[in-house]
Amino acid sequence: MSGPYAIHRTRVEWIDTDAAGIYHNTTVVRFAEAAEAELMRAYDIPGYFPVAPRVRYEVEFEASIRFGEEVETRVELVRLGRTSMTFGFEVWRGASGDEPRRRAARGSYVTVHVPDKEKGGSAPWPPAWREALRSSDRAEPDATPARTKIIRS
């Protein structure tokens, strides 16, 4: 991976788990989208989420994460197309007790620019958004949320 990316750190909360206290598969989507939101804020892409529905999602689950464990999620823009974006992501379980840090899930997803929900259909991304995401010399933000780190390519 070599495009713009963000890292979001959090803990698995009880609401994120099933009855056994193991993270629910849908939690991975929330972790990835939290990191994606930070990425879009860092690159000043306002109004992105309402016009960027997900059209494809793939996840490979590799390890369980339990209630209270620390999680680090890395999301990266791997392809910026004319009307779509492809993101790759990894979710890592933090080291705990005798267990080392371990990748819990990895995958990818595609968003498509649909600015007019009434008409439907995709449209090119706004030029300012494309330029911002292609920029690699932008300065690091002065202050990032305590549990999120933005890293620019």
Image (tube, helix red, strand yellow):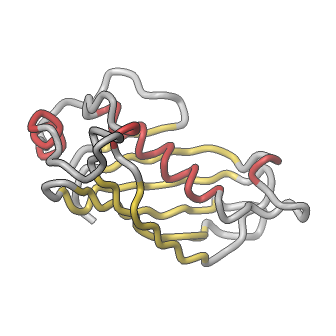
Foreground: 119 or 107? 119
Residue 92, picture quadrant:
bottom right
Q: Which residue is drawn at 60% across and 76% down?
A: 61
Q: Residue at x 46, y 67 (%)?
A: 57
Residue 112 x, y percent position in the rendering: 29, 54
Residue 46 x, y percent position in the rendering: 30, 28
Q: Check the picture and name the quadrant holding the N terminus.
A: bottom left
Residue 38 x, y percent position in the rendering: 41, 37
Q: Which residue is drawn at 80% across and 54% down?
A: 67
Q: Which residue is drawn at 72% across and 50% down?
A: 12
Residue 7 x, y percent position in the rendering: 44, 47
112 sits to left or right of 24 = left
Total numbered labels: 0
User: Which residue occupies the extreme top position in the image?
Assistant: 142
Above/below status of 63 relative to 147? below
45 sits to left or right of 93 = left
Residue 151, picture quadrant:
top left
User: Which residue occupies the extreme right position in the image?
Assistant: 19
136 sits to left or right of 53 = left
Above/below status of 14 relative to 137? below
Above/below status of 128 relative to 86? above
Residue 22, picture quadrant:
bottom right
Foreground: 29 or 140? 29
Foreground: 114 or 3? 114
User: Which residue occupies the extreme front position in the image?
Assistant: 119
